[in-house]
Image (cartoon, rainbow, N blue to C red):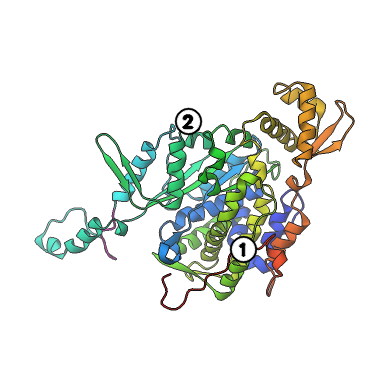
Amino acid sequence: MESRSGPYSNWHEVLTDPRFSASSEALRKYLILCEGVESPTPYHIWSFISLLAALAGDRLTLSNGPMGRERLNLGIVLTGIPAIRKSSALTLMQKFAQGLPVSYGPTDTAGQRQGIMSAMLPRWQKDSLEDNSTIEASLSTLEELAMLDTDGISVKLENPLERKASEIYFVSKELGRLIASNSRELFDFFTDGLDGETFHYQLKSQTIKIHKPLMNLLGATTPGSLGTLMPRGGDTHGFLSRLIFVHAATVERAVPIPKEWDDRQLSVKGDLHQSIHEMLETQNADISLTEGATETFKDLYGYCPSVMDIRLQAYSGRRAKHLLKIAALLGIMREPKAGKVIASDMRLAHALLVLTETTMDRAFFGLDQSLYARVLCAVAELIEGSSDGSVSMREIQSQAGHLAPKAQLFDMLESLVIQKKLESAKSTGDDNSTWRLQSKNQTVGLGLLRVAFRAGGIGEPQPDEFRTHKVGVEEVKNKKGSAG
């Protein structure tokens, strides 16, 4: 795939950079399948990464010291104005996933946890009773009964840690149907599920225990809807810090009549499926980091995104964990049977996160339900839906005049300029005044792009090129024989 101009050219430049070529091959192949779809490039990239995380399940993990194995599950939310083809990206991913072992969860919870638990419970109870062989459902002879390893089965049933993980993959084209604002308990439930915490739920006549939940989430919503689906105080909930918000402003291309995949694309799909099946053949294997990947991760451990809504600070603290998981997924797709992460996997994962983080705070414009936030969200949607990236006072009053009187709207817009959310494109003090998103919310800055590309370089990076500040935490080096 060649580099191109357009709103998402930076993504293609990163993927086609020869320094990332080995690590980005699977992503570039998947984008070939997306050429006839209007959805923005980052939607497709993160949908594919989300699918890989769901497929990795409990089979492929990272060592996490005394805390056990780190599974590669992710929570990803696509955001953007209505009709930007968020659902199309999810639909295409699910079409690609046909024939792959994916355990989908319900798309509508009605704000309750019981339905999800019921969906997960049969998977939890289905223990692996066989060891490299299959046991027939009916054992009709004494010889077959004598050969049955009942001791091994008893041990597995008595020890919940030996049971299979209860894997479930939520793909929600309308996130509000999956997570309802009237239930803070549901947010706690999803937070625990993404962390792999054991569920113990007591009903009047039944106790539900799920010892090894494994959730992956891929959802879609608009910034304006995000605030409505959150419970009171939800903007400080730990659930948001566990999500990667992927925001896009315009469609990739105009495709009036989508076509079926041609022979070339079907061949690419077959190649990707073969690589995925090779990945799945590796059971219960810990993915390791090469020396180069380890050193790169240490350099990136203190990296803090410079473009951040204050409510995304919790995400910044979890960024390193996201980085490690994404790098591992890139590594197992690069060479499925090797089970190793190399430096370019880590650097490409960093570059993808950098490009995503430049617009991540745009997803939070509608999180607050104050009047200022509602005006900002409405104006931002008008700007992103415009042809020239700006909007006039006349258009704002026409589309958002119900929120506040004209004079108050004008004062609020000027206040949003001071807050560096908007910038004035033409200030005339009348209906011809125009605004656009502050430049940091429009494009990827040269400095951040330099970070992304320098991360793929050879040799040791300069410290300032990897982070905006150094964390004041001294690295702990374990001595021989110490715990962890």
Tell which of 99 and 161 is nearer to you.
Answer: 161
Q: Is residue 446 visible?
A: yes
Which sits earlier in the primary sequence, circle 2 or circle 1?
A: 2
- Which secondary structure lies at badge 2? loop
Kind of residue at badge 1: Gly
In the image, residue 130 lies in the stretch drawn in magenta = yes
* Number of other residues with Cα within 10 Å of mark 1, as a class: few under 14, some 14 to 19, many 20 or more: few
Q: Is residue 175 above or below residue 468?
A: above
Whole-percent x, y for residue 70 in the image: 45, 60
In this rendered view, identify the residue nearer to me: 94 or 200: 200
| Other residues around mark 2 within 10 Å, as few (<14) / some (14–19) / many (≥20) | some
Q: Mark 1 — residue?
A: 472
- Mark drawn on residue 211: none
Check the image and report above or below for 64 versus 311. Answer: below
Q: Quadrant of the N terminus?
A: bottom right
Which is nearer the eye, 159 or 270? 159
Give residue 466's position: percent from left, percent from top: 68, 64
